[in-house]
Structures are given as structure tokens and as C-alpha cells.
């Protein structure tokens, strides 16, 4: 159940049956709600709350996302080390080519040495000393060249072996890392599925998400005169502020206007026509029975936004007294939700053609904060509201109970009903799975 339904239902009930509500309010205020919130049940039983499970699921999701990223990086590393143009591959190939060339050079040097030895051995007996010396020198030179070629080949072979080992070790390390990352990813996925299941099971057991009272989400009417002439059109606004430390995905302000003639006996709500407009949806649209007045999506932490409102009062509307109720709620992408409590703004309706004077802006009535008072089952504080609760009238005085004016009774009943209904239904309500948001 959303605040819009609570607002419309409780106010409608209040303005149609004020005496019943006034007499019933003390009993309702003293009676503690039968059902505590799912979060409180879990806290008392030692089980994790849905909020804790949501954090765990988000943490598991991030761990899985990080694991997937790490696996991709490991796969890229394997491809990089195995690439034909990888630095270690190029170095190993070049070292092997150098070793092959050194082997060829050594083979040539060995053949030259063998040829020189053969030439020395086949000198004729009558060879001169010069011929013998030349042959001997050729052997010595060929032997030196062969030794140098052998040394060069050994060095080239060593470099080739080292380069090949470096390439092999890098490839082995890359494949080992990939194996570890894939194993970690599999583990992270299992943990994510377990966390998601635990959260889903908890939500299913709870019948959906709890909607929480959120005092840091504020909705205030600005620019509404305290006196409005029948037949006129008044532009004002609802100023919405997200005082929380998180972005609110969709914030919906809700408004309800109620009025009677001066006797307080005749309801003239039908003479009041309310429209809304936002920057995202600038065309004026009627505020329906739900009280929804557009939406703000999203509203970042600490940010504020205005929803424009336009009130038209029929020219034949009698002079009277009115109350404007405003509240707001939010819904996140994960269906978690919350909202504040309705605030009332009294105003006067002046008959057409009459001077309103300078009455200033309508001021909010008493706060209906649930942070003090009795504690219903589930640990939520509820402000007890009795029929004697003073409620500010449009003139700023306390309500009188004389038969000459029924409006103060209506105002008191409406305020009490809104406060009680909002606390009992908004703070403790559950968002049923699949319910409209």
C-alpha cells in the first residue's frame, strides 16, 4: 500500500465521518498494531534482515563482477603471451635464428679445419719448407676459426634456450593465472547465487519489501496563499528534498485538498480542481483520487526539486475553510520503498469578488512525526492521538467544538486520521510482491 492510498483513504474517511473518527481515535492510538515489521522479527530472531541480505547480495554481485573482469584480463594475458608478435615470442624466435646461424657457421668452420688438415696431410714429400709452413698456418687459422664458431654456437644456443624458457614460463604463468581466475569466478558465481537466493527467500517469506518511514524525505508546500478567492487560479509548488545519503529512484509527491463552507457542514471538495506539472512533464495534468502529483526520477542525495501545482476554485464556491495535505514516498529499482507522513496546510476560501487582503502564505500544521510516543509491536514509535489533540485551525487558533462551526472538528479528525493512518499503515505496511508502485 502506497502513501497515496493512505492519504486519500484516511482523509476521505475523516471528512465524511469526523465524529466517529474523533471518538475512535484514542482506542486506535492505544491499540498496538498486531504485526511487527519483518526487519524487527529478523532482528529478534538473530536472522539477517532484508537490508543486510541486500547488502550481502550487492557485495556478492560486485565480487562476481570483479571475478569476471579478472578472468577476462587473464584470458587476454594468455592470448597476448601466445601471440606471434608477443615480445617473448619474437625474442625466442630471433634467438633460435641466431643459434641456427651459429650452428651453420660452426659447421663451415669445422669443414674448413678438416680441409686444412687434409691439405697438410697430403703435402708431397718434396714440398718446400714454405709450402709446409703455409699448410701448417692454414690449419692453425682454421682451428682458431672453428673454436670461435663453436664458442659462438654455444652462446647462441644458451640464449635461445633462455629465451625459449622465458616464453614457456610466461605462458605457463598466464595459463596458471587463468585457471585460478576461472576457479575464483566459479566460486564467486556460486556465492552470488546463494546470496541472491537468500534475499529472494527472505523477501518471499516476508511477502515483499517493507516500506519505511523516512523523515529525511521532506515535502513542503510553497507559495500557497492562506486566503484564496473563489473563481481564481493559484499557482504554487511542492518542494521535495532528499535529505538521505542515497539517490532515490522515483519520488512521488501526493496531495489532497479538502474544504467546507463556513458552517463546516457542507463539503465543497468538488469545487477545487488541482493540477500538476514538472520539467519532465510540463503539460498540466489533473491530480486524481490517488493524490499522485507527478514524479521525480531520480532525486540524488541532498538534492531538491519542485513540482508545480495549480489550484482552480469554482467561481460559485462559497466562502469557507480548507486544508491541503501533502506527503511523499519513493520506490527504488529493487522495490524497496519508504515515505514521510502527511502535513496539513490550512487556508481560507474567500467568496468571489471579495478582497482577500494580505494573508500571507499558508503555514504547515503540527508535525505528525512517529519518533515519540507509544511503541507498537515491531519497535516503531507511534505518537498517540486522542480526540483532545489540539490541531491548528486556518486562523491559527485551537479547535473549538461548538456546533456553530464543524470545520475544526473536521480538521481535527482529518489530521488525526492522517497521522494515525500514516503511522499504522505507511510505517508498518508491507509492499506485497507484485503490488502496483
Image (spheres, rainbow, N blue to C red):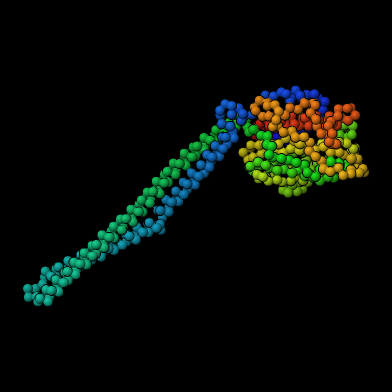
Residue furthest to the left in view is: 125
Q: Is residue 78 visible?
A: yes
Q: Is residue 157 left or right of residue 418?
A: left
In the rendered image, residue 405, in percent from the top left (x then y), is placed at 88, 30
Q: Nearer the viewer, residue 91 or 253?
A: 253
Quadrant that contains the N terminus = top right
Q: Is residue 122 left or right of residue 280?
A: left
Q: Is residue 6 visible?
A: no
- The residue drawn where x is 48% and y is 44% is 67
- The residue drawn where x is 72% and y is 43% is 240
- The residue drawn where x is 54% and y is 40% is 59
Judge whether 73 appears above or below 267 on screen: below
In the rendered image, residue 244, in percent from the top left (x then y), is placed at 65, 41
Q: Is residue 50 left or right of residue 403?
A: left
Q: Quadrant of residue 357?
A: top right
Q: Nearer the viewer, residue 384 or 125?
A: 384
Judge whether 79 appears above or below 106 on screen: above
In the rendered image, residue 310, in percent from the top left (x then y), is placed at 81, 44
Amino acid at each position: 500500500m502506497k502513501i497515496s492510498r493512505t492519504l486519500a483513504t484516511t482523509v476521505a474517511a475523516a471528512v465524511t465521518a469526523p465524529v466517529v473518527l474523533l471518538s475512535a481515535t484514542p482506542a486506535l492510538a492505544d491499540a498496538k498494531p498486531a504485526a511487527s515489521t519483518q526487519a524487527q522479527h529478523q532482528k529478534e530472531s538473530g536472522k539477517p534482515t532484508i537490508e543486510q541480505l541486500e547488502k550481502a547480495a550487492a557485495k556478492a554481485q560486485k565480487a562476481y563482477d570483479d571475478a569476471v573482469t579478472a578472468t577476462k584480463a587473464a584470458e587476454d594475458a594468455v592470448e597476448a603471451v601466445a601471440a606471434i608478435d608477443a615480445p617473448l615470442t619474437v625474442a625466442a624466435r630471433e634467438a633460435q635464428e641466431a643459434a641456427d646461424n651459429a650452428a651453420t657457421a660452426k659447421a663451415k668452420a669445422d669443414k674448413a679445419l678438416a680441409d686444412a688438415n687434409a691439405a697438410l696431410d697430403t703435402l708431397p714429400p718434396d714440398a718446400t719448407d714454405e709450402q709446409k709452413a703455409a699448410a701448417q698456418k692454414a690449419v692453425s687459422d682454421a682451428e682458431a676459426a672453428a673454436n670461435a664458431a663453436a664458442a659462438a654456437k654455444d652462446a647462441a644456443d644458451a640464449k635461445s634456450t633462455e629465451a625459449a624458457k622465458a616464453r614457456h614460463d610466461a605462458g605457463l604463468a598466464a595459463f596458471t593465472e587463468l585457471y585460478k581466475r576461472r576457479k575464483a569466478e566459479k566460486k564467486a558465481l556460486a556465492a552470488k547465487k546463494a546470496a541472491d537466493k537468500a534475499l529472494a527467500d527472505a523477501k518471499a517469506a516476508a511477502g515483499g519489501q517493507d516500506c519505511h518511514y523516512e523523515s529525511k524525505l521532506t515535502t513542503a508546500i510553497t507559495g500557497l496563499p492562506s486566503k484564496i478567492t473563489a473563481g481564481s487560479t493559484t499557482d504554487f509548488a511542492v518542494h521535495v528534498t532528499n535529505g538521505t545519503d542515497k539517490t532515490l529512484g522515483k519520488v512521488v509527491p501526493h496531495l489532497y485538498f479538502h474544504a467546507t463552507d463556513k458552517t463546516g457542514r457542507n463539503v465543497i471538495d468538488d469545487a477545487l480542481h488541482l493540477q500538476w506539472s514538472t520539467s519532465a512533464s510540463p503539460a498540466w495534468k489533473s491530480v486524481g483520487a490517488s493524490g499522485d502529483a507527478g514524479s521525480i526520477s531520480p532525486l540524488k542525495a541532498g538534492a531538491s526539486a519542485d513540482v508545480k501545482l495549480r489550484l482552480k476554485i469554482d467561481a460559485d464556491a462559497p466562502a469557507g475553510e480548507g486544508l491541503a495535505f501533502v506527503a511523499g514516498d519513493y520506490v527504488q529499482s529493487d522495490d524497496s520503498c519508504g515515505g514521510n507522513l502527511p502535513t496539513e496546510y490550512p487556508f481560507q476560501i474567500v467568496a468571489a469578488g471579495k478582497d482577500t487582503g494580505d494573508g500571507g502564505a499558508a503555514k504547515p500544521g503540527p508535525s505528525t512525526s512517529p519518533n515519540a510516543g507509544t511503541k507498537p509491536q515491531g519497535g516503531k514509535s507511534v505518537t498517540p492521538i486522542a480526540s483532545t489533540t489540539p490541531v491548528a485551525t486556518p486562523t491559527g487558533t485551537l479547535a473549538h467544538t461548538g456546533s456553530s462551526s464543524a470545520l475544526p472538528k473536521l480538521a481535527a479528525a482529518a489530521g488525526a486520521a492522517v497521522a494515525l493512518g500514516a503511522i499504522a499503515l505507511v510505517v508498518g505496511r508491507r509492499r506485497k510482491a507484485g503490488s502496483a508502485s
